[in-house]
Image (cartoon, rainbow, N blue to C red):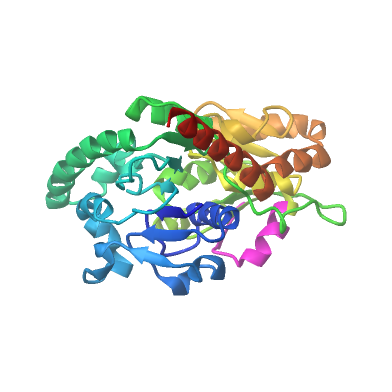
């Protein structure tokens, strides 16, 4: 088959781009389409594929300020020429699914998340803007919501990265979706070779408001347990101003150091409501239990009472209570069981499950022809 892979933008290697890598491994002759690409910031696997950019890439400063051109992206997608392709797979987090696909060509959309900033996170995103910015974004988001819902009809089949995202697809687009969890690179994450002290708790994330590092740090104020905070971001200076003595802010650490931090952690604290959440799976691959907020994608990866514990409220009090509960139950968490559970989220499993969906959709389309 001649396959087109449509991704929102290619300016770094995060979770969405790791999914795209696995799609390229499934379809090694596929062509990539995107709004803007920076090959210097991509893996060789992606950078070496033919990449077609939309007209957004020709606008001033697009590689750095592509998000400022959000209002032009719907039109840019619709001008991409996908004629001659036998299969189109869009990778949706920013605008990607709105491409116009030739009649008879199946269009499958893998949804990392419906655009948060125009839907359920609209209020929090808007609050970060100034008065003029809020006025402009209010008008833009309204138009984008209409376009986003309308273009859902251009997709033959949706695939969500978690049950949480599948429910949001139903809510916003009124469409059902299969669930195929994203691939987690587990090669670097494994049980420690030697017995671990597992003394400190661990938090790993960008230090931005919705990740809720502030709640975790406050929860450990007065606790008799150390906490290591890994990450950097806009909240760092604020968090450093009043840091409890038992909390250490490590900042951004090299990727090679992260497995060791997981392996030596008592437990990972995961307080955000994420679409899926790769960090908990990385921690569990190292045999480390996860104390997670009991909403969002964590419900798909953490097994309450076996690979971690859930807390029901995003508050310091709820996190502190979860830590104290874990301390009384720590012996019931088997690192080998936890690691074996995480192994089910690897890349091979993703390719197998996604291929099965594609084959089913193509067979269904052929039957209608």
Q: Nearer the viewer, residue 198 or 173?
A: 173
- Name the residue: 63% across, 41% down: 223
Left or right, 165 with reference to 269: left
Task: State whether residue 190 appears in this view.
Answer: yes
User: Where residue 197 sits: x, y (%)?
Assistant: 81, 52
User: Where residue 76 sits: x, y (%)?
Assistant: 24, 55
The C terminus, quarter of image: top left
Q: Quadrant of residue 105?
A: top left
The magenta span reads 245-262
Vertical position of residue 183 compared to residue 157: above or below: below
Task: State whether residue 164 appears in this view.
Answer: no
Q: Residue furthest bottom?
A: 40
Left or right, 326 with reference to 45: right
Q: Nearer the viewer, residue 73 or 315?
A: 73
Q: Residue furthest front?
A: 369
Q: Nearer the viewer, residue 350 or 226?
A: 350
- Name the residue: 17% across, 40% down: 143
- Name the residue: 55% across, 33% down: 360
178 is within the stretch colored magenta: no
- Name the residue: 75% across, 30% down: 328
Left or right, 333 with reference to 41: right
């Amino acid at each position: 088959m001649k396959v087109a892979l449509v991704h929102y933008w290619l300016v770094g290697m995060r979770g969405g781009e790791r999914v795209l890598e696995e799609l390229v491994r499934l379809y090694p002759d596929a062509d990539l389409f995107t709004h803007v690409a920076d090959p210097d910031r991509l893996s060789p696997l992606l950078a070496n594929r033919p990449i077609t950019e939309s007209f957004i890439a020709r606008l001033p400063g697009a590689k750095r300020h592509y998000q400022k051109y959000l209002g032009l992206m719907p039109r840019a997608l619709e001008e991409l020429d996908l004629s001659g392709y036998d299969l189109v797979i869009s990778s949706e987090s920013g605008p990607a699914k709105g491409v116009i696909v030739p009649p008879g060509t199946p269009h499958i959309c893998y949804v990392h998340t419906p655009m948060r900033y125009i839907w359920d996170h609209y209020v929090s995103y808007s609050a970060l803007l100034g008065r003029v910015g809020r006025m402009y974004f209010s008008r833009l988001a309204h138009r984008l919501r209409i376009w986003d819902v309308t273009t859902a009809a251009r997709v033959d089949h949706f695939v969500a990265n978690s049950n949480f995202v599948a429910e949001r697809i139903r809510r916003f687009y009124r469409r059902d979706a299969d669930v195929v969890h994203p691939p987690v690179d587990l090669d670097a994450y494994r049980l420690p070779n030697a017995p671990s002290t597992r003394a400190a708790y661990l938090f790993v994330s960008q230090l931005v408001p919705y990740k809720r590092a502030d709640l975790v740090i406050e929860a450990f104020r007065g606790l008799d347990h150390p906490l290591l905070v890994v990450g950097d971001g806009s909240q760092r200076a604020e968090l450093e101003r009043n840091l409890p003595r038992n909390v250490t802010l490590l900042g951004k650490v090299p990727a090679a150091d992260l497995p060791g931090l997981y392996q030596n952690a008592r437990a990972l604290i995961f307080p955000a409501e994420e679409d899926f959440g790769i960090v908990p799976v990385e921690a569990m691959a190292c045999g480390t239990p996860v104390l997670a907020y009991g909403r969002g994608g964590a419900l798909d990866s953490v097994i309450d009472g076996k690979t971690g514990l859930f807390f029901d409220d995003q508050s310091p009090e709820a996190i502190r209570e979860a830590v104290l509960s874990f301390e009384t139950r720590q012996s019931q968490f088997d690192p080998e069981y936890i690691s074996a559970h995480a192994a089910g989220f690897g890349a091979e499993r993703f390719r197998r499950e996604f291929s099965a969906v594609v084959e089913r959709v193509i067979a269904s389309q052929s039957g209608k022809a």
